[in-house]
Image (cartoon, helix red, strand yellow):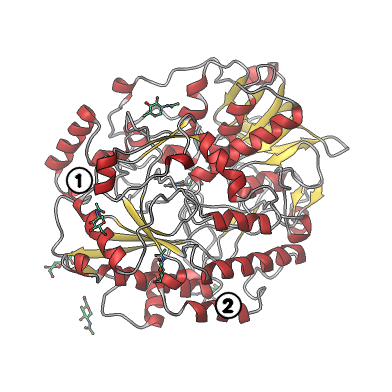
Amino acid sequence: MKLQVLSLTIGMLAHTSLGATLGKAPEFATVVTPRTVLENSYDFVIAGGGISGLTVADRLSEDPSVKVLVIEAGIFDQDEDNILIPGQFFTPFPFQYMYLPLPSVPQTALNNRSFNVPAGKVVGGGSVLNAMVYVRPGAEELDAWELLGAKGWKWKDLLPYYKKSENFTAPDPAYAAAANFSFDPSLHGTTGPVQASFPSFHFKGSGIWFEAAVSSGLRAGGDPHAGDGSGVVYIPSVTSGTTRTRSHARLNHYTRIQPRSNYHILAGHTVARILFDNTKKVTGVEYLPSGGGERLTVQATKEVLVAGGAVHTPQILQLSGIGPKKVLNKFNIPIVVELPGVGANFHDQPSIIIPYNVTNNVSPNVGTLNSDPVYDAEQRALYDATREGPYQLTRGLSTNLALPPLCNATSDCRSIVSAARRTNPFKYLPEDTHPTVKAGYALQREIILRQLEGPKTPVSMIHWDTANSVRMYFFKPLSRGTVQINSINPLEWPLIDYRTNVDPTDEDLIVASFLKNRHIMSQPSMAALNPLEAAPFSNNITDKEAIKQILRGVTEPSSAHQCCTAAMMPRILGGVVDPEMKVYGVKGLRVIDTSYWPIVLTAAPTATTYASGEKIADAIKAEYGLQSL
Ligand SMILES: Cc1cc2nc3c(=O)[nH]c(=O)nc-3n(C[C@H](O)[C@H](O)[C@H](O)COP(=O)(O)OP(=O)(O)OC[C@H]3O[C@@H](n4cnc5c(N)ncnc54)[C@H](O)[C@@H]3O)c2cc1C
Ligand SMILES: *[C@@H]1O[C@H](CO)[C@@H](O)[C@H](O)[C@H]1NC(C)=O
Ligand SMILES: *[C@@H]1O[C@H](CO)[C@@H](O)[C@H](O)[C@H]1NC(C)=O
Ligand SMILES: *[C@@H]1O[C@H](CO)[C@@H](O)[C@H](O)[C@H]1NC(C)=O
Ligand SMILES: *[C@@H]1O[C@H](CO)[C@@H](O)[C@H](O)[C@H]1NC(C)=O
Ligand SMILES: *[C@@H]1O[C@H](CO)[C@@H](O)[C@H](O)[C@H]1NC(C)=O
Ligand SMILES: *[C@@H]1O[C@H](CO)[C@@H](O)[C@H](O)[C@H]1NC(C)=O
């Protein structure tokens, strides 16, 4: 979940370091240079050290006879406060750990605006900078993956891996009951490396808004991890229940297990392409410093695992000769295998911020941290001393979310769905979409429409921050975009076209959610605070076309939940990988990051990304007969 609030102008140096209190990240012998890489051979080379890459590297290197190298484009973080302390989130903006700039192409259905594509470029990837929201999707959605051909990826199949990945700290029962948290211990793990917990603090406004969301007809949702992703729920975060600091992939899948001399990380280097022999078996990768320089190669005797994230993974594949013929021919890249689905089926979850003037709000609220430096300093001191108070919460966020199914958001749900069904499913796809990708999309579309008319899958996520804004995230887009190389230089950005809202049904879904938010805000408990939509919105604008017009000027294409550019579907449906994440048509190559998702899930991706890393690591270990600890 992305926070669009903070500007890039905030200086990066104006932070103090928590390092003094928590201990600096030590330098391990396993952080290597290109020289060490040249002197070693590896069984597995992993391209990209984000959530997926580090999860799999950790598990494979449990077997001491296996040598694993992770090549990560970004650098190591330094345990800065704005990384570790939730209340310090994005203050200052951690731009040294992101791909910046990474522009999208102009978005035709969003007034031709271009956007920066949010993506982590740091050891740990998105987990180092994300908003720490920790949720699972509904069972129905993972079950739908299997309908799309991802055999063995049902809810029931992934549940053991969600549990394996996490150490879930139960909230204090009395506090949880008063604050409407709920938690089913049988569905959680307590021995995994990913620390997850509920905060022990909420702003009073959270409760007021919870009551309004319930009185608007939404069900108090209980445990958001139990397989029903809808309702009004309190959210856990990816933080330790003891230190109340971020648990990111560098900490939980690398630092935690050091020293482990068979697990190497080469930071600051970018994988340029994958190398094959003449039987299309992977032999290794070519890489270079992320700032530019000489190209080097490293051998992978077993496999290369691609984990660059959903924007960069298709770039790596296309540069390696795996992708749509037209794109490869344009850059004279020899075709290793034609897979039209590489870079197709790109989606994310569009988002908006609705500014409010809450003229009778209760205080303190999350805004008080920014408006009252004395309160802010007191709360930071409280956190430093006792780990209590609002600094446990991701700065800018509250503690609960509303997740309405479409038919709980609007009485128009059936007409929206039936209009979409009457539309030619291919009408809004890119013009040159390959027939196999079209066939896969047609199936996806029908599955999503069924979810939208059903009672279980939310259409959006609504979040009042307790101060002056509501953020909304749109979960079930029908529009599909593309990621295609624009150059043979691996350090240049690809053409990233979200194609947000090109399918006009997506605008109807956004308007339905927008009006549901208005409904929640008008319930008695919230109405007492007198929340007024601020410019460019206004409560007196009720015409749907007028609302759509405004939305085109403010909708963002992303929640930083990019996915699906190398989908796990059959090849005849435009798929790129099989249910073991093996790339079709070659040997020794898998795609192990969120690119493999066939369709985006309701929830924020982190929990599922860690869990699927565990699952695929198990499959690889079984195939090669590797040991576990
Ligand atoms: C600002 C922000 C906020 C977010 N908020 C939330 C949230 O609150 N909750 C949630 O669940 N999710 C959130 N997410 C999303 C979540 O973090 C991602 O979905 C998740 O990190 C994806 O994991 P991944 O393994 O696919 O890729 P990533 O974790 O992005 O890792 C990919 C890694 O590959 C590296 N890389 C790319 N190309 C190359 C190359 N050619 N060579 C070498 N290395 C390469 C990148 O530098 C990166 O480190 C957020 C993301 C961002 C950016
Ligand atoms: C967006 O750009 C296209 C192509 O330049 C143009 O035809 C269209 O009118 C523009 N749309 C808006 C809303 O400005
Ligand atoms: C808990 O739920 C009740 C009933 O909806 C509501 O009145 C109360 O404000 C909620 N408390 C919190 C902290 O959400
Ligand atoms: C949706 O509305 C129905 C009918 O009022 C209700 O029974 C159900 O609990 C609601 N679902 C959610 C997730 O709020
Ligand atoms: C799980 O979290 C609790 C609370 O933070 C901590 O005491 C315990 O050591 C953690 N266990 C693991 C395996 O990380
Ligand atoms: C908020 O509303 C109050 C009362 O109507 C008004 O005085 C104030 O100017 C408004 N503030 C903003 C930022 O619009
Ligand atoms: C609508 O509200 C805005 C601000 O809240 C106000 O300026 C405007 O006059 C109102 N328009 C109508 C038609 O009431």
Amino acid found under the numbered disc labelled 1? Leu
- In the rendered image, which quarter contains the C terminus? top right
Q: Secondary structure at mark 2?
A: helix
Residue 536 visible in the shown view = no
Q: Residue 626's spot in the image, x, y percent?
A: 70, 24
Residue pointed to by mark 2: 420
Q: How many marks?
A: 2
Confirm or reject: label 1 Cβ below 8 Å from ligand 6.
no
Residue pointed to by mark 1: 369
Quadrant of picture, ligand 7: bottom left
Q: In this picture, is 324 found above or below 112? A: above
- Horizontally, residue 232 falls left or right of residue 487, namely left
Compute the Cα span from label 2 to label 1: 44 Å
**Sooner in the amino-acid sequence: mark 2 or mark 1:** 1
Q: In this picture, is 569 found above or below 260? A: below
Q: Residue at x 47, y 65 (%)?
A: 459
Residue 260 visible in the shown view = yes
Q: Secondary structure at mark 1?
A: helix
